[in-house]
Image (cartoon, coloured by chain):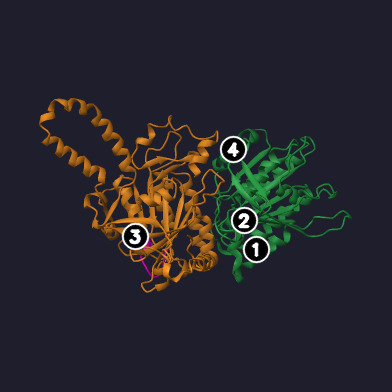
Amino acid sequence: MATAKSRASSFSRNLTSTGAVSYIPGIKHGPNGTTFLSSGIPDLDKILGGGFPLGSLVMIMEDAEAPHHLLLLRTFMSQGLVHEQPLLYASPSRDPRTFLGTLPSPLLSKEEKTLKNEQEQEKGLRIAWQYKKYFGENQPNLENSRDTRREYCSEFDLRKPMERHLFSAKFVECFSTLDSSNLPAFRDSCSRFLEKVPRTDGGVRCAGRIAIHSFCAPQCGYFNNEWDMVSFIGSLKNMVRSSNAVVVVTFPPSLISPSLSKRWQHMADTLLSVRAIPDEAKEMSKLLTGYQDMFGLLHVHKVAQINTQVPVILEASTFSLKLQRRRYLVLERLHQAPVDGSSGTSYNTSTSCSGSSKASPFDF
Amino acid sequence: MEQYLSLLDQAIEEDKTRVSDGAGRVVLIQDCVETSGAFLLHHLMKRALSRESSETVIFVAFAQPFSHYDRILKKLGCNLITLSQNGRFIFFDMLKLDCPDEVGGGRTKSGLVDLFHKIHKATEVIASPETKKSCITIMIDDLSLVEVAAHGSSNYVLDFLHYCQTLTSEVGCTLILLNHEDIYSSSEQLTLNLEVEYLADIVIKAKPLATGLATDVHGQLTVLNKRSSNEHGKLKKRIHNFQFKVKENGVEYFYSGSRT
């Protein structure tokens, strides 16, 4: 929606002139002079209008009882590694590097598979060998377009760990936030990292990613200094604004005071929250189709508004997290289950639904 | 020149002719996570800058870099770069203002004190008799981040605001503040928001629609004009309620239900 609007205005960016830049893998130009990085989940990119804009702060509110935020964090990091973008990962564990071993590996896309099949078939077609020269002209072109399309956002196989050579590379930095009162040191390492991807006028050459896992976990030494944490996030946001990077921070809102949580929500450019689905929720399974396949809910509270004042109004703000073939993560809109015809109270049911929509966090 | 006044302008302007003491006003914009009130700042900034009169805007930015405002105001029809070259737009980039928490807060204070001196100096230059530019608008985006820069010492922030408020009567400038209301909803955090609300002559609250998200209506505004007066010259409080839709080149304001 936002894209269409900005195209209509006379100030839209001339996309053709910067076409050369967009061939850099993992970077896509958006409206209002923004540049997007992929979140690693194709559906989420679509929902957010292209991905996370460079220079933005993404905050993910964790569910206190489920590790669903790790899925978003993992795909975000894996996508960066696939594109060989520099990555800084911070977590409140003793050895943050072990987390890299749990990153999912990119999946061969369907197109790639069909390409392989085609090649195999081509080998089989011996009769038409003299027509091959006609294929030859089209082939490189096709491949090129396929490459750029595929590379922006790959799908990840959540069951297969990433190959070692990808994350043992030297462009991955890890930082443990467990040591007590090391926020200044953390800030320094972030700013050193961001200096590597400065914002220049000559287009984007390289983009960085910072992933901070459970920023305000109670085991961190700085947990009691609320204002230190707030000003850290504030200065991180300001640092990242002037660089070509995206910062993703997850935090447990239930552990901190509501006003601190609100402050962070205001600071965030893009605000997401994840929630697990309780197993025995009979009411919900009656209300929603495909409830059995869902394992969590993703709520989009805020979409980044960089260089624009128009808010992005999504058609729906709650999405279900599902696994397709137990491998890929997909996001789907919630669908109301068909009402049982025999009861004959479809009108009543629907009104009660819309009436309860204010109380319940779901919107249809 | 006949100027089209939107509902918001009407709600704010209402008594402009009646206030004869020349003192400026304090406008407070309150918003929440669901509905950003930044567009109101842009609207007021545009209104001040596009006037025929030579009004000057002093913008103190804690939230966004210059390029962000520049792009938005360009779409609204103001070129901030030319205006700042003409001296009608003064931008203070305070993104990096961070006063480390020293014992006794001495340095915390000095950061904001320096900022006030800069603002004061700027207003003196503008209001000096040889330049003859009388109307000044000071905008602060946003107050909660001033508090963050001061490491949570809300007393310093309040001191800073009181000093800024003195400018409204001294130089006759308008002070426009943006604050996030929902941060201050818990009981121990109330002070700053209440004090600022008390200072303000006009409070504009931006809220999401109670019925949920909609593409045609982005939210609703409540304008409380404390200095509004009726035809007999009596002061009375007036509250205006209307809805809005934000677009790239402006904002539409309308009464609820008046759009077909």
Give the letter of the orange chain: A
Can marks 2 and 4 be said to lie on one chain?
yes
Q: Is residue B140 left or right of residue A78?
A: right
Q: Which mark is residue A322?
A: 3
Which quarter of the picture shows residue B109? bottom right
Tell me which label, 2 or 4, sits earlier in the chain: 4
Query: What residue is disc 1 on?
Result: B192
**Distance CA(mark 2)–CA(mark 4):** 25 Å
Q: Quadrant of the N terminus of chain B?
A: top right
Residues packed near mark 2 inside 10 Å, few (<14), some (14 to 19) or many (20 plus) = many
**Distance CA(mark 1)–CA(mark 3):** 44 Å
| Chain B shade | green
**Distance CA(mark 3)–CA(mark 4):** 40 Å
Residues packed near mark 1 inside 10 Å, few (<14), some (14 to 19) or many (20 plus) = some
Query: What residue is disc 2 on?
Result: B143
Query: What residue is disc 4 on?
Result: B75
| Front residue of A36 and A217 | A36
Which quarter of the picture shows residue A218? bottom left
Q: Residue at x 72, y 47 (%)?
A: B9
* Residues shaded magenta: A62-70
